[in-house]
Image (cartoon, rainbow, N blue to C red):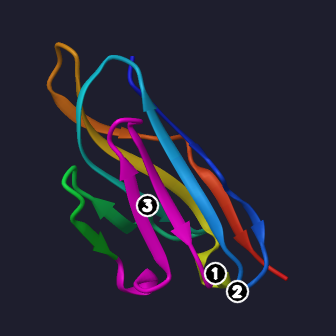
Amino acid sequence: QVQLVESGGGLVQPGGSLRLSCAASGSIFSINDMGWYRQAPGKQRELVVTITRGGSTNYADSVKGRFTISRDNAKKTVYLQMNSLNAEDTAVYYCNADIWGVGVTNRDYWGQGTQVTVSS
């Protein structure tokens, strides 16, 4: 059974930084794109950033220059370094990955979500 487990959320003051991690585990053959999405209260889930297996990235305009995604393919882990956080970044952050399980076709998996709150 494949699962994604996130960590690193919390409460931070405006202008501060947080680093999120998301580790994939289970019977995994290969991981394609990985990424982060977020959902603020009363809003739809939105793309934050994605990264291909080869390292190509796609950032939402709202986080360009402040957030950095990276991945460690050997550890099956994706990271999100978030700097210069502001109140508009407050949301539940979800990890997403397109994973080929052993013996099964690829599909999207989601983490359970981690809360990020930016407040003074």
Q: Position of residue 82 (x, y in %)?
A: 56, 72
Q: CA distance from mark 1 to mark 3?
A: 16 Å
The reply to whether discs 2 and 1 touch (Cβ–Cβ < 8 Å) is yes
**On screen, residue 25 above or below 99:** above
In percent of the image, x 68 and y 83: which residue is there?
87
Describe residue 32's horizontal placement relative to residue 8 as left or right. Answer: left
Q: CA distance from mark 2 to mark 1?
A: 5 Å
Q: CA distance from mark 2 to mark 3?
A: 20 Å
Mark 1, other Cα within 10 Å: few <14 / some 14–19 / many ≥20: many
Q: Earlier in the sequence, mark 2 or mark 1?
A: 2
Please give the range of residues in magenta.
60-85
Residue 77 falls inside the magenta stretch: yes
Q: Position of residue 69 (x, y in %)?
A: 41, 64
Please name the amino acid that badge 2 sits on: Gly
**On screen, residue 51 above or below 1:** below
Q: Earlier in the sequence, mark 2 or mark 3?
A: 2
Describe residue 105's horizontal placement relative to residue 108 as left or right. Answer: left
- In the foreground, 89 or 16: 16
Q: Which residue is mark 1?
A: 85
Mark 2 vs mark 3: in front: 2
Q: Which residue is mark 3?
A: 37
Q: Earlier in the sequence, mark 1 or mark 3?
A: 3
